[in-house]
């Protein structure tokens, strides 16, 4: 019984990390209906940014975070215009191949430039642990969790109450109708993609003090982020956050009770089970999975 | 008199050439090409590239100072094998397009099976220098040879160290040791762990208090650590892949999990330089079964072993600036050196004649790189007892050789490990 506080804490912290990664993905997925397989590689690039800023310029990752915002917004805009824009009206197959191609290209560029060594950002506080009620919480993970909640809330508010958010939601619901209403959908897509990439940039920088970075570091997070996005209801920010915590809970509790080898089986079974019962995900509107297609 | 002078001159030239032959001063007749297959992209590329560098260092050494192979200059056709499918297709390409008769590689246990099957279909010799999957030599293939021990050898040595060294340092008999086994779930991790579990239980009666496998891409090992902590082991036998070692060590510290010793095997996980870079002095304490590191007494080797070991270390120093070769360098170079010895003995790459020459080799421990010897078993496996291994420990942010003690100047520290902050 004395492990319960730790299991709860681990669930929240891990769920926070997954949510932080999922939030940008759900934006891109929800608005553009593009399955961005290169998402994990942008995460990896952000982790490298934090690593090099720390090792070469002695910049703390939380300072790098501020730098990452414009850098990843620019990277998002550039990658949209160069890679995604030509295929944005093509079939899903073409988009999947494009993002997979971008993913492989970015991985291998990282491999050539920085080798496959696992690199670590060892800050002064990397081993700092906060102990609350019998649970030990890693400081950097607490920060990531707080930022995840803040990012989700900010994006939720942005989508719900801002004019641009409303335009994005309109584009998500019906691309052609929104064009007819005078919305520049191309601009909406570019902005959505760039904001999504900024989110993953923030996630990557915050992950750097917690996990080592290497060229395929994004892969181990992005599959789970996809699960959280679909489970939460495509494009639903709060849904993705809650789904990320659910996935983390299944992973943590399953690892403890049944064994670590079972964790992926458990959360993917849960994923399949929920989609059978609710194809639009836990919080998605009925039919949302088919919108915009 | 002129004849005498002429004879002396001819004799001197012959002696010079003879010495040149030994030293390999560019007297090589033509080229001999082999295929080298390593993961140079993807998840395993860090070690794959280190291995390739080891091959290249030894190739240059063989060509420049040791007479090439079969009197010819050794050259490589390199293939990239990031996954088993690519390993098989690249092995086929090397055999059919490059026309090689020998392929060497492919350090990972996830790759060597597929690569050697493909090589077998092309009737090409497959010379493995590093993968430790026991199944590699248990398939009845006539074309496969392995210079490194298999996973069971790693497990065997780890338990040897626990029983013969750790137990008495912890003030216990081997059958009083409480051991928890934790491993990533690849065939490498499983083969090392299962052999260690078997030998620990059957031969020494050690108490197994936990056994857990996990995928190396796991993002949180805290639940596993909580279970292991409750089991209260003396020794944690942990086989890790790479980033999972870094994650485990950090989270074990967060949870204040105080095991008394951690034992690993192989050039990944705790055996990788990445672990030291991640933690510096905070990574002091874990043991990793590997090839020799600082502290190794080269003068304990046989003269021919000392000669090649010193030449190899000079080459590594010139290439990398480091006095100490990395584990991947040692396995690749050690294996390629044995291949040279085999080819020089066989004088051909005809499979039957090559096999006969390989099985006829009987070279004692201490004669080759890493203090290895050579005596192949009928299944193509270099005998475990000839592939001398060493226990290294992270001390002061570096790995040093601590066991067997007769081969090293360094000694194992922090047994038991004690508090996380007290291992400086």
Image (spheres, coloured by chain):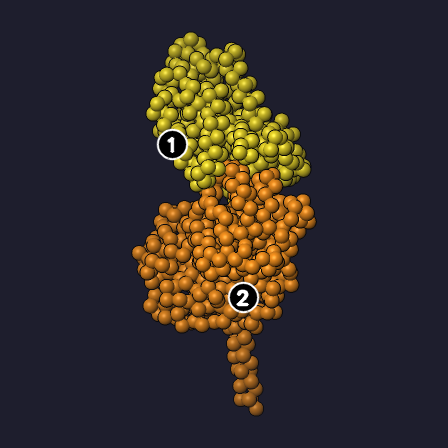
Chain colours: A yellow, B orange
Asked if B207 appears above or below A40 in the picture, the reply is below
> Badge 1 is on which residue?
A269
Q: In which quarter of the image is the C terminus of chain A?
A: top left
Work out whether residue B405 or residue B164 is closer to the camera in this orientation and state it: B164
Most extreme residue toward the bottom, as rendered?
B1
Most extreme residue toward the top, as rendered?
A181
Mark 2 or 1: the one toward you: 1
Residue at (38, 53) in percent of width and height: B113
Q: Which chain carries label 2?
A: B
Lateral position of residue B20 relative to residue B117, left or right: right
Q: Can residue B114 be seen in this view?
A: yes
Lateral position of residue B388 relative to residue A121, left or right: left
Residue at (33, 68) in percent of width and height: B352
Q: CA–CA distance between discs 2 and 1? A: 51 Å
Q: Which chain carries label 1?
A: A
Q: Residue B371 carries which label?
A: 2
| Residue B96, horizontal then vertical, whole percent | 33, 55
Q: Can residue A205 be seen in this view?
A: no
Is disc 2 in contact with disc 1, using a CB cutoff of under 8 Å?
Answer: no
Name the image quarter holding residue A226: top left
């Amino acid at each position: 019984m004395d492990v319960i506080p730790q299991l709860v804490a681990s669930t929240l912290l891990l769920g926070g990390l997954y949510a932080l990664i999922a939030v940008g993905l759900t934006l891109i997925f929800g608005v553009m209906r593009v399955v961005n397989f290169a998402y994990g590689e942008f995460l990896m690039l952000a982790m490298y940014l934090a690593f090099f800023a720390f090792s070469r310029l002695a910049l703390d990752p939380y300072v790098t975070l501020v730098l990452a915002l414009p850098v990843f917004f620019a990277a998002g805009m550039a990658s949209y215009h160069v890679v995604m824009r030509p295929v944005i009206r093509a079939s899903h197959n073409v988009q999947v191949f494009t993002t997979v191609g971008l993913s492989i290209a970015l991985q291998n560029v990282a491999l050539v430039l920085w080798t496959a060594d696992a690199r670590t950002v060892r800050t002064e506080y990397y081993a700092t642990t906060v102990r609350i009620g019998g649970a030990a919480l890693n400081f950097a993970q607490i920060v990531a969790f707080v930022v995840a909640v803040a990012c989700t809330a900010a994006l939720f508010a942005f989508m719900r109450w801002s004019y641009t958010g409303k335009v994005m939601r309109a584009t998500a619901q019906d691309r052609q109708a929104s064009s007819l209403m005078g919305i520049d959908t191309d601009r909406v897509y570019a902005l959505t993609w760039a904001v999504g990439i900024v989110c993953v940039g923030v996630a990557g920088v915050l992950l750097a003090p917690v996990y080592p970075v290497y060229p395929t570091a994004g892969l181990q997070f992005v599959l789970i982020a996809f699960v959280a996005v679909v489970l939460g209801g495509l494009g639903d920010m709060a849904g993705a956050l809650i789904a990320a915590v659910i996935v983390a809970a299944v992973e943590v509790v399953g690892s403890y009770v049944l064994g670590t080898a079972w964790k992926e089986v458990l959360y993917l079974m849960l994923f399949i089970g929920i989609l059978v019962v609710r194809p639009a995900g836990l919080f998605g509107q009925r039919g949302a999975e088919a919108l915009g297609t | 008199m002129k004849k005498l002078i002429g004879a002396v001159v001819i004799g001197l030239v012959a002696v010079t050439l003879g010495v040149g032959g030994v030293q390999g001063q560019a007297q090589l007749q033509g080229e001999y090409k082999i295929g080298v297959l390593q993961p140079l992209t993807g998840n395993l590329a860090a070690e794959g590239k280190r291995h390739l560098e080891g091959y290249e260092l030894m190739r240059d050494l063989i060509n420049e100072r040791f007479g090439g192979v079969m009197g010819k200059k050794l050259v490589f056709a390199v293939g990239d094998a990031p996954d088993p499918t690519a390993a098989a297709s690249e092995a086929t390409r090397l055999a059919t397009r490059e026309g090689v008769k020998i392929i060497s590689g492919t350090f990972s246990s996830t790759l060597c099976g597929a690569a050697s099957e493909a090589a077998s279909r092309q009737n090409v010799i497959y010379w493995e220098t590093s993968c430790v999957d026991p199944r590699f030599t248990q398939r009845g293939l006539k074309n496969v040879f392995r210079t490194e021990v298999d996973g069971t050898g790693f497990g065997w040595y780890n338990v040897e160290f626990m029983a013969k060294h750790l137990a008495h340092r912890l003030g216990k008999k081997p059958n009083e040791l409480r051991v928890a086994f934790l491993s990533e779930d690849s065939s490498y991790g499983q083969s090392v762990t299962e052999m260690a579990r078997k030998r620990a239980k059957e031969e020494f009666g050690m108490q197994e208090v936990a056994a857990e496998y996990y995928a190396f891409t796991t993002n949180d090992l805290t639940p596993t650590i909580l279970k292991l902590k409750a089991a209260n082991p003396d020794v944690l036998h942990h086989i890790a892949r790479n980033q999972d070692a870094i994650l485990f060590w950090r989270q074990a510290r967060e949870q204040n999990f105080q095991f008394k010793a951690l034992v690993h095997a192989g050039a990944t996980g705790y055996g990788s330089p990445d672990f030291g870079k991640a933690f510096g002095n905070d990574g002091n304490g874990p043991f990793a079964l590997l090839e020799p590191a600082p502290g190794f007494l080269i003068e304990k080797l046989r003269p021919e072993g000392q000669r090649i070991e010193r030449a190899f270390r000079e080459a590594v120093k010139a290439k990398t600036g480091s006095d100490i070769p990395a584990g991947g360098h040692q396995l690749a170079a050690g294996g390629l050196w044995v291949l040279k010895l085999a080819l020089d003995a066989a004088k051909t790459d005809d499979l039957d004649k090559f096999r006969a020459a390989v099985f006829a080799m009987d070279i004692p421990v201490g004669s080759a790189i890493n203090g290895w010897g050579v005596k192949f078993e009928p299944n193509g496996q270099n005998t475990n007892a000839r592939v001398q291994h060493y226990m290294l420990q992270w001390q002061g942010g570096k790995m040093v050789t601590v066991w067997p003690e007769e081969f090293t100047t360094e000694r194992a520290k922090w047994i038991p490990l004690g508090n996380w902050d007290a291992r400086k």
